Structure formats: C-alpha cells, structure tokens
Amino acid sequence: MNLRYKLFTAFLGLIIIPLFILGMIMFFVTYNSIEKKYSQQSEYSLKAISYSISSVFKDMNNVTDNGIATSVFHMALSAEDPSKQDLTDAEQLSLNASQRNFRSLLYNHPSISYAFLYNFNGKGSSEIVSLFNKENFRTLPYDKFKESDLYHEVMSLNGVPKWVAPHENPELTGTETVFTQIRLVKELSFFQNIGILVVQIKNWEFESIFRNLKIGDSTQKVSFMLVNDKGMILFDPDRELDGQMLQSFTTKEITYKKGFQSFKTQFEGERSIVSMYHLMDYPWSLVSVTSWDSLSREVTIFARWFVFVIFICFLAALIFNLFFMNRITGGIAVIVRFMRRVEDGDLISRVEEKGNDELTLLAKGFNDLMDKINNLFNRIQLEQRRKNQAEMRVLQAQIKPHFLFNTLESINVLAVQNEGRKVSEMVYRLASILRISIQDRDEITLEEEIKHLRNYLDIQKFRFEDLFDYEIEIPEELNGCGILKLTLQPLVENSIQHGFEGIGYKGKLLIRGWEEQGNLILRIEDNGIGMTSSQLSIFQYMVSENAHNTEQIKEIEDPHGSRDHLERRGLGVRSVADRIRIEYGFRYGIFICSSQDSGTIIQCVIPKYGQGEDHNAKSIIG
C-alpha cells in the first residue's frame, strides 16, 4: 500500500469510521426508544378511550335502569294497546307522570336512536312494543329472536345489560354503525320476567371520542378502531374497515388477550405500530394503528443530516488526498498502473516522459524495457508462424501421396482389365482432384471440397463396384463456408478402406453437414465393421508423444499380421485432425464414435466462416 492510501486509510479509520459508528449507535438507540415511548403513550390513550366508552354505556344503563325503576316499561308492556306506546308520537297530556319524566329524560339524552320491547305475554302485533320509531328498519320477529344465542345470553344475565356492537348481530340491530343495549325487563313487585328491552344509541359520542383524541404529535398518522375477540372490526371512525377482519390487513398473527399489547408489523402494506387494549367489562379491544414513518420522521431527518455531515467529511478527505498526496505519489502511481496493464497483456503501453527528476528516469527505463520485450515477442511470433506453416505442409504432403497411391493403383487394375471407358472417367476425375490439390492455397469453399469428395467417391465406386453407396446431405447455404482442403476425403477414405473391409453386405456412406452454435458440423457415418476400443485408441490425435503412440500400436493385434497396416489405417484421419488443431485450436477437431460390428461415426467440428474471412479460432498465435 502506497503512502497516499496509507494516509487516506488512517483518515478514514481514525476519524470518519468512528464518527459513523457513533452516529449509527445514536440512531439505533433513538430508533428503538421511539417504539417504547409510543407504546406507553398509546396505552394511556387507549385506556382513556376505554373509560369514555364505558361512561357512555354506563350513562345509558342508568337511563334504562330509571325506566325499569319507574315501571315505564312495565306500563308499556301491560297497556291495553301496546302499539300506541311510542313516546315520540304520544301527546304529553296522555302520559302519566312517570312516562312524562322518562320521556323528558330520553329527550334530554340525544344519543338514543331506537328503542322497542319484546313482550313475553303479547301475541301477534303486541309481541313488539315500539318506544322510539326508526325509519326503514324492520324489527326481528320475536320467535326468531328466541332461537338465537343472544336471547339465551340475555336471559342468563337476568337483567344485567348486554351491549352488542355494530356488525355482530345485523339481523337484530341492522347494518348501521350503532351500539345496541339488550336487557331483560322484570316486574318489580314479583320480579317476574315480562319482556326484553332493545335500545340503540347513536354513534355521535363515539365519533367525538375517537376524533378528538390524538397520540403524540398532531402530524402523526393514527387510526383507531374497535375489534371484537374474533378479530372483526366493529367500529372504524373513517368508515373504511367496518365489518372486515383485522388479521387480513397485517402479516403478524394476532392473539386477543386481556390487558395491553403493542407490536410493530406491516398494516395494509405499510410499516406500523399496532397497539391493543382489551376493555374491562366487554368482549372488545381498542386498536390504534400508527404509521411508523410518521413516528420516525424526526429520526429520519436526523439520519439524513448525519449522512450529509459524513459525506462532507469524506469529500474533504478525498480533496486532501487528491490535491496534496497526488503531488508526492502521483508519478509512482502512474508507473504502477502501466505495469499492471502490461501484466494484463498490453505490451504497447508507454509512460509519458516529462520533467527531469528520478521519476522521469524510472519512466524512461520502463519504456526501454518494454521496447526490448516487444522486439523479443515479435521474433518469437515470426518463428512460431514459420514453424506452423512448415508443419501444415508436412501434414498435407502425408495426405497427397497416400491418396495418389491408392487412386493410381485402382486405374492400373482397370487398365489391366481393359476397362478403357472407366479408365478415362477415373483419369478425368483424378485430374479434377489434382487440380484442387496442387493449388497454392490451403483453404477452399465447402462447395469445392464437396466437388472434390464426389470425384473421389466416384473413383472408388468404379474401383469397388457394388461395394457401397453414398449420400451427401449438406444445405446449399453452407456452400460458401471456408474449410481446409482435403478435410472430408481422408475421412471418407478411412471408412471405405477399413470400414467396408471384408463385409458381406452392401455398405452405405452418409455425409451430412449443418450449423450449430456458430460452428460447422460435418459428419461421416458408415455401416461398416466398426472398431474395437484398442483400435479406436490409435486416433487419440491429441496425444503428441510419438513413443507413446508406437507402444499403443504394438499392443494391438493386427488380424493381417502387419504393423504397417495399422500405422497407415489412422494416418489420414490423424492428419486431418492435426491440421484442424493447428489451424483452429484445441476446441476443434475430429470426434470418432465406433464399436465393433456397429459402424463408425466421424464428426468434424470447425468454426463457421466465409472463405477468406478471419475468425476467432484461427491461428494459435492470434
């Protein structure tokens, strides 16, 4: 590590990083204290709401207690015409003193929305006695009410008021967001059950309780709701979540228990703090949901300022390092950078020589050294190219005499047999083959190579009549592809000379070609005698040690007793494979698949390119 980086690291390690760690500790301590502090505030607030709600219920309990104590409900139930006991429609003069007092009490208590009585002794229209009418509301018949669990619960309470929240029993209380008191009415003289009172109160007071109460700062996003022990939202002042299940809005499993609880979770996809307080005498819980972003706004502002200060400090460190340390270490850093470029293979990099100090001498020495290395590499590259060209010529020279020997031998046999027409045809095709072979270029088009191969196959068909048939299936769009000449002919020759040797059936050759992943694939398939694994090992052309190959050949038993026969058997295939390896690299070559009595498949893989075009695989040096 150079001096500039050492000083910069020291500045970061001794100033910036400790400052950053201190700020993060303060941030997390403050961040965690917010939830604790808010939980305490929400507990006090929910308890206050609970007290206010209980006060409303107690007030209404007192009103109905007064009605029972003054026998107003008893008189309404025992009247000759119960249908005319509606206190909102009755004339003041027709009421007795108790009814007038109770009516004044009801009118002075504006929260009552609807009230009626179930008459135990009534029949027909007298089963339901209306005290306060309500438009567009149809009372649940008494016989259906008796079948409900709520009826049995009210009877078991024996006169103690039962409060029903909105959406809990809509068939009895309707769909409006009102709370309903249900209680058993007794005749005070004999404590006989004479009816059930149902009173609904308006939600004005509840809305004022929720809307006038805030937790903490007025900018905080807080919502309140009342939930029963089954998780149903009974009352939402905003009227958005009424009747829905609280669990559907949060990812945390909620348990409804006595007392207070608070936790952080996702509510409607937003991080929030959910606080819950279970009411003392009712099966309901008060819930407050506060957006965490609104709570942590101050801490977030602090964090932004902290990040800004850290950024300014870091920027100051960079400016100090740039304008002061670069003057000392800049020259060395430039030379080191160029040395790394040389390590990555860029041998033409040169350092600009300016000034007359020691760094200039160092740069001059670096440039002189790179000039000498480049000269050396050029010499090695030239020698390697000449070596490759010489090796290519040797491989081609191995193929040409081998092919000419076999072809002239076939012509000689036909001449002895006085087959003049066949001799003429073979000489013509041999001339076409030699015309391509003696051209002073190593690369031809695939179309020329196929024409050369057809001439060769026709010569062999003349020579070995009825020995084999052949098919060539190569798409015309591949005819313009470049290929090393004399690539296919030695591979086909191997199949004819050795694959069809001694067979008792007609052989078949299939030459196919296609493009695959940017490569040109050429495949020669025959139905000949195939090869054993030991014979197949001769074609391991990737092994370059001649001594090792010689030992392999010695270990193979030749049925004809000729070691020279085995050596010549793989000569053409190995020559083609070596030429492809030298020209295109080790990713390309010949792949042979064969087993005894099952034929042989020889697949040649070369890069696909047009004749004369350069390609990525071409030349080992390139």
Image: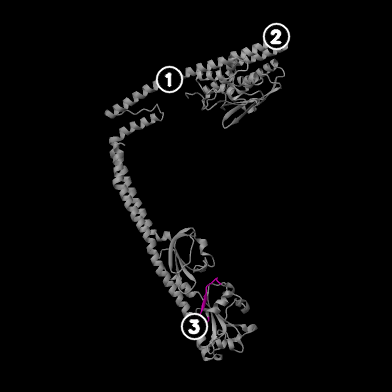
Q: Magenta stretch?
A: 158-168
Q: Nearer the viewer, residue 175 or 248?
A: 248
Q: Is residue 502 above or below residue 198?
A: above
Q: Which quarter of the rendered picture does the N terminus lie within?
A: top left
Q: Which mark identifies residue 63?
A: 3
Name the secondary structure under disc 1: helix
The residue that disc 1 covers is 380
**In the rendered view, does 567 fall on the left or right side of 31?**
right
First of labels 1, 3 by sequence position:
3
Task: Indicate the secondary structure of the residue bearing disc 3.
Answer: helix
**Which three-letter amino acid code belongs to the residue tagged 3?**
Val
Q: Callout 2, which amino acid?
A: Ala
Where does the image place residue 135, in percent across and percent down from the top left? 59, 77
Label 2: state its secondary structure.
Answer: helix
Residue type at tag 1:
Ile
Q: Is residue 421 visible?
A: yes
Q: Badge 3 local density, few (<14 within 10 Å), some, or many (20+)?
A: some
Mark 2 or mark 3: name the one nearer the start of the chain: 3
Q: Is residue 341 above or below residue 198?
A: above
Give the CA distance from mark 1 to mark 2: 53 Å
Q: Nearer the viewer, residue 71 or 314?
A: 71
Residue 470 placed where, x, y %? Answer: 68, 23
